[in-house]
Amino acid sequence: MDLNEQQQPPQKRNTTQMMIAHGVNLTKQRRIIADVLFERNQHVTADQLFDLVKQTGSRVSKATVYNTLGLFTRKGLVREIFIDASRTFYDSNNSHHHHFYNVDTGDLIDIKDRLAPHFIEQDLPEGTSMDIVDLVVRVKNIKS
Amino acid sequence: MDLNEQQQPPQKRNTTQMMIAHGVNLTKQRRIIADVLFERNQHVTADQLFDLVKQTGSRVSKATVYNTLGLFTRKGLVREIFIDASRTFYDSNNSHHHHFYNVDTGDLIDIKDRLAPHFIEQDLPEGTSMDIVDLVVRVKNIKS
DNA sequence: CTGTTGCTTAGAATAGTTCTAAAAATAATT
DNA sequence: AATTATTTTTAGAACTATTCTAAGCAACAG
Ligand SMILES: [Mn+2]
Ligand SMILES: [Mn+2]
Ligand SMILES: [Zn+2]
Ligand SMILES: [Zn+2]
């Protein structure tokens, strides 16, 4: 339902370095957002992230949270995951991996290995059965 | 951008039979919608389907289009494909397959075979390169 | 008929997201 | 430093896909 802890050990990342490496200009608000977002591997909605920032005592507008998530996505710092029309998650773990989404609980958790879809069924989370495999390969035009 | 023709030959399907087989009660509006939707394999948004129905001269409310697509989805007649927060497509081909989505053109086309994601790169549509593979395995709780 | 249930409908409401336009911060230039 | 240009933030309005509401209609059973 809410934030989903990840299995990987939470290695503290240098958010300043990350932003510079990806060509993101540093600002006060972006630092705050990045620090909260990359504190650990997690899947958060824009609204959840907005709340998390608030909980640290810092004040960042919701518009900036959206703007920053969009920027981070374009720059490759985070991955957008579209679960349905009203559930967009941002994945602070930008490495290549896929997800289990539990339609009953709303849990969104990582698939550890790059398993072929046909073999995933063997490794479902405890107490769950396969619902639907949604694979969308997004391609882009080769710029000429 | 708009409706994407599919590669498969459009075999006319008996929509009445389909609905009965899936436990959908027959109504005037559901027949109209099913006839338009299953006329061929296609990926349509609710709004596009609403327009298509209008073009046949029949009048069905937008609410009923949404209700019917929801019902058809629950009964397994169609598949929902969530491309992003404002793009939900309904696939009139409910057989197990995946999709290429072109982020530049908006084209949504079928992936013919059940390829493992790692081998898909070899078979991209002409003039496109891989953007992102979005695989979400939806699981559900085993009811006790 | 009469009541019950299921279905359709218009329009209102919801909610996630984007837009707008102005202020603030930051950087560049003289 | 002072001025100018650029970027960023912000509150709130606007947008839009979808869902909800509540009333009417259709089908059907008793
Ligand atoms: Mn909240
Ligand atoms: Mn339209
Ligand atoms: Zn993840
Ligand atoms: Zn398809």
Image: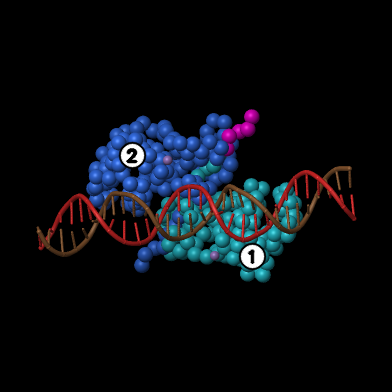
Chain colours: A cyan, B blue, C brown, D red
Q: Going 24% across and 50% down the picture, which residue do you hit?
A: B25
Q: Secondary structure at mark 1?
A: helix
Crowdedness of circle 1 by 10 Å Cα count: few (<14), some, many (20+)? many
Q: What residue sits right under mark 2 in the picture?
A: B53
Q: Position of residue B73 (x, y in %)?
A: 36, 50
Left or right: where B72 falls relative to D26: right
Q: Are marks 2 and 1 in contact (CB under 8 Å)?
A: no
Residue A44 vertical position relative to residue C19 in the rendered view, above or below: below
Q: Which label sits on residue A135?
A: none
Residue drawn at point x = 58 percent, y = 34 percent = A141
Secondary structure mostly seen in magenta is: loop
Query: Closer to the camera, B65 or A135?
Result: B65
Q: Which residue is mark 1?
A: A53
Magenta part of the chain:
A140-144
Residue at the spot 57% in from the left edge and 44% down from the top edge: B132
Q: Is residue A70 visible?
A: yes
Q: Is residue A70 left or right of residue B25?
A: right
Q: Nearer the viewer, residue A81 or B120?
A: A81
| Residue type for callout 1 | Val
Q: Is residue B73 visible?
A: no
